[in-house]
Amino acid sequence: MSTKYIFVSGGVTSSLGKGIISASLAKLLQARKLRVTIQKFDPYINIDPGTLNPYEHGECYVTEDGAETDLDLGHYERFLNVYTSKANNVTTGRIYRSVIHKEREGAYLGKTVQIVPHITDEIKRRMLLLGQTGDYDVIITELGGTVGDIESLPFVEAVRQLQWELPKEDCVLIHLTLVPYLSAAKELKTKPTQHSVRTLQQNGLQPDVIVCRTEHPIPMEMRKKVALFCNVKPNAVIESIDASSIYEVPLTMMKEKLDEIVMEKMHLEGLPEPDMTKWNDFLHKLFNPEQEVDIALVGKYVELQDAYKSILESFIHAGAENKCKVKVHYVHSEYIDASNVAEKLQGMSGILVAPGFGERGIEGKIEAVRYARENKIPFFGICLGMQMAVIEYARNVLGLKDAMSSEVRPNTPVPVIDLMEDQKSLTAKGGTMRLGAYRCKIEEGSLAHKIYGKTEISERHRHRYEVNDNYVKALVDAGLRTSGKNPETGLVEIVELPDHPFFIGVQFHPELKSTPENPQPIFVAFVKAALDYKNRAK
């Protein structure tokens, strides 16, 4: 069987959920025993999202092999339970950089370098790359942005060429649009969808399937109208109605027969019915919690949920595993100080101090750590959150009042958090951190060992600064246990407090590997500890 290529474009407006539709279709095809992966082509000129402010683009998701990517890759991994890689996320910036490097090396033999064919050829090469590995039966490619945007045009043109170059049964285009509901008229409107498809057609593309995002059910007559004006079969007009959880969407798409329509168009025959047993088990636990628990997420990007997307999803997975609903309360670290920390964190059964960069909100995070430590409230610190736990302990237990990170205060006399030696000479910001999966050796008998059940793990990183080795012995002598270290460098990866019910900080990002079918162990243990704390307090 030749590799099949599915392209997912979006129209009318952004944030319709192309990533969730792509991941849902991939899940259904995977459940039919096909080998599937998803890739995202983003139209912005940044090389990757690594240098983007979370307010601009949500969280930056990191893959096993150290790529800083779009947050949609997190959805792909959570739905498929399969790792993605650098090849799964491509930006316009990366395309142009590649073409310009080739031009400088004389690869084009003196020709004028143009959007067509040079840029589009490079886009097509990357679109087909994963399919040429022999590892996948189906490659789903999500096109970022909205059809009609100037920056998306080269991607659209590349897909048009591929529709012409590939065998008809090997290439399917799915277009996701909005069917808005006008409350004053009390009716749904298909005109935006018609305009969106017409824009596609003007660019030489004809969708095979139209997925209509809607808040209200779309009657059959309206589907027939969309089919008529958009030149598709009526059964290829799919309704994607708002769901209470993104994890319901695969079942909605199965009910709408999206996978069957795609299989028919691609001549995929003789496949088994989708086995969604584990997925349904997860959904049953998700929608039937036996308890509730309140957990504070202390961070500085709390106005935008997408900034902590993987953390929030990890709480959903861990909550289901514990048969409870985790109510996450966003607490802005910039507005926490010693005088109001008790008020801000009142009623919380667990406190998570989130990752981040820069000075803003640092002192509030340190106060939140102190409050959790002194009041024996379950605590979990991730990356910068772990570093704040080390600073707090150095200040308030070890007595080093000036303890700080040199990231925040470059001339601090007590840099308990400092830059790695190999980072000090770097001037470029993009792609220069410790990125991707690294090993961590765990001490037997520690809380981390109890959580993971093993003495060596591998977790993903995204940071420059580390716990300063010069202060580790003093911290350990004062009672802070360094229970996890990198076996090659000896750098501290995990800290914990043995005399606390649950206190753990990790330098890595465990949230990046949590999925509904394999919830992340620290999140599961943290939610359980928060439940125990809540039940003890009754």
Image (cartoon, helix red, strand yellow):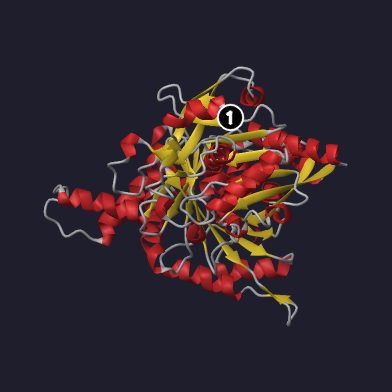
Res. 519 visible in picture: no
Horizontal side of residue 373 vs 120, given as left or right = right
Residue in front for this viewpoint, 78 or 155: 78
Q: Which residue is mark 1?
A: 480
Which corner quadrant of the image does residue 511 belong to? top right
Residue in front for this viewpoint, 205 or 112: 112
Horizontal side of residue 410 vs 278, given as left or right = left
Specify the quadrant that holds the C terminus.
top right
Which corner quadrant of the image does residue 422 belong to? top left
Residue 97, position as x, y percentages in the image: 27, 52
* 10 Å crowding of disc 1: few (<14), some (14-19), many (20+): many
- Residue under the point 27% across and 60% down: 116
Res. 342 visible in picture: yes
Residue 96, position as x, y percentages in the image: 29, 55
Outermost residue, right side: 538
Horizontal side of residue 55 vs 99, given as left or right = right
* Figure check: 359 above or below 204: above
* Figure check: 28 above or below 103: above
Outermost residue, top side: 444
Residue 330, position as x, y percentages in the image: 66, 55
Please tell me whether mark 1 sits on a helix, a strand or a loop. loop
- Residue under the point 57% across and 55% down: 306
Q: Amino acid at mark 1?
A: Leu
Outermost residue, bottom side: 184
- Residue under the point 58% across and 47% down: 366
Residue in front for this viewpoint, 4 or 462: 462
Residue 491, position as x, y percentages in the image: 44, 28
Q: How many marks?
A: 1
